[in-house]
Image: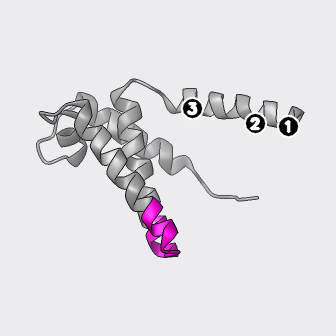
């Protein structure tokens, strides 16, 4: 059992939501959300970070797994925000799945 404080996910998500409505030309998130390729740019980044995470696992490189997984989660949060999916919705879905696993 982990006692990890995952509130950082909420904090990062809130910053992403803020960047979605308050453009800052120096913000990486704003550049992703407003890229000329649109959603395809965000999808490219999620795909890239997924592959890098897979390679880190394949190479059994713990530090790289942590680093690349963090990149993947960050870009996934951008994708969720861009599609108006809230972390509450994700938490509710995971909770529902957890409940059904306990019954199995």
What's the image's color scheme? Answer: one colour
Magenta span: 54-66
In the image, residue 59 sits, relative to residue 40, either above or below, namely below
In the image, residue 102 sits, relative to residue 71, either above or below, namely above
Q: Which numbered marker is on residue 2?
A: none
Q: Which numbered marker is on residue 102?
A: 1
Residue at x-position 80% and y-position 32%: 99
Q: Where is residue 70, by image quadrant?
A: bottom left
Q: Quadrant of the N terminus?
A: bottom right
Q: How many marks?
A: 3
Residue at which label 2 appears = 98
Residue 96 is situated, as x and y percent measured from the top left of the image, at: 72, 28
Determine contact: label 1, label 2, CB under 8 Å. yes
Q: Which numbered marker is on residue 90?
A: 3
- Marks 3 and 1: which is nearer the front? 1
Q: Which of 93/59 is in front?
A: 59
- Measure the alpha-carbon separation of dots 1 and 2: 6 Å
Q: Which of 7/104 is in front?
A: 104
| Element marked by disc 3 | helix
Position of residue 38 in the picture relative to residue 78 (left or right): left
């Amino acid at each position: 059992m982990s006692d990890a404080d995952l509130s950082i996910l909420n904090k990062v998500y809130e910053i992403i939501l803020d960047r979605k409505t308050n453009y800052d030309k120096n913000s990486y998130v704003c550049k992703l959300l407003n890229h000329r390729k649109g959603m395809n740019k965000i999808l490219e980044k999620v795909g890239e970070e997924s592959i890098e995470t897979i390679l880190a696992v394949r190479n059994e490189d713990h530090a790289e797994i942590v680093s690349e997984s963090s990149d993947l989660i960050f870009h996934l949060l951008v994708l969720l925000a861009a599609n108006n999916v809230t972390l509450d919705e994700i938490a509710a879905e995971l909770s529902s799945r957890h409940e059904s696993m306990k019954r199995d």
